[in-house]
Amino acid sequence: MSKVRRVRKEGDFPRAVALAVSAWDHVDGMMQYERRYGGQAELKSVDSIDFVLRHAPLLFEHQCLNTLAALLKSQRRIDKNTSADLAEHLDEARGLMWDAHRLWRHLEQHGEVRQEQIRTALGGDQDRWRWIAETWEEMGVIQRTPQGGSYLLAFSTRLDEKVRGKCPACGATGSGAKFRLLDEITCPRCKSQVHFVLLASPSVEQ
């Protein structure tokens, strides 16, 4: 997790999420160690899991959440030995991803959106929308420009920009307009209906 925090500080959120997922191989062993030598029969939560639940939905990293679901199913004592209900938090993360997708679409449709008007347009909790916007700003996804006591939200990059993406089902990579890769598409290799994961790399030449 020290690597995760360092990479996050550098602004590379996709890599930070990937590092957090890789730490899950050691969660069960860490819990056994804490029970035997640390005197902790139950942990409050697991940092690497919390990090993914918080950030993967805003990157549309569907596969990370699927991987966590499989982990909790195969190693049930992870959820059992934490005071947090990780299965419930996973469901909440899926809901967060849906809200993030709705806000993304709203920004696509309008180009610029006043932050305090998001709740009026999309419903839900304004604090949640503000947190999504603030986190996206930190990730470099959007710009928040102060305006009239609120903020004007707009994408930091052009949606017709050509970028690289990866199929979360089979790992195939390809390139296309950003707005197309954000839609559910058919992977040319495995034919699965998926949302491609945008790769943290320089844009592809037009």
Image (cartoon, rainbow, N blue to C red):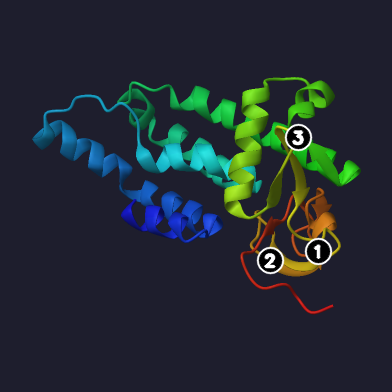
Q: Residue furthest right?
A: 109
**Element on which disc 2 rests:** loop
Could you classify mark 1 by the number of other residues whose Cα lies within 10 Å: few (under 14), some (14-19), or many (20 or more)?
A: few
Tell me which amino acid carries mark 2: Ala
Q: CA distance from mark 2 to mark 1?
A: 8 Å
Point out the frontmost of discs 1 and 3.
Answer: 3
**Element on which disc 3 rests:** loop
Tell me which amino acid carries mark 1: Pro
Q: Which residue is mark 2?
A: 172
| Upstream in sequence: badge 2 or badge 3 | 3
- 15 and 82: which one is in front? 15
Circles 2 and 1: CB distance less than 8 Å?
yes
- The x, y position of residue 114, in whole percent, is 79, 35
Note whether 166 is above or below 119 in the view shown. below
- 1 and 193: which one is in front? 1
Q: Which residue is mark 1?
A: 188
| Upstream in sequence: badge 2 or badge 1 | 2
Note whether 110 is above or below 23 in the view shown. above
Residue located 27% across and 28% down the image: 43
Q: CA distance from mark 2 to mark 3?
A: 45 Å
Q: Which residue is mark 3?
A: 148
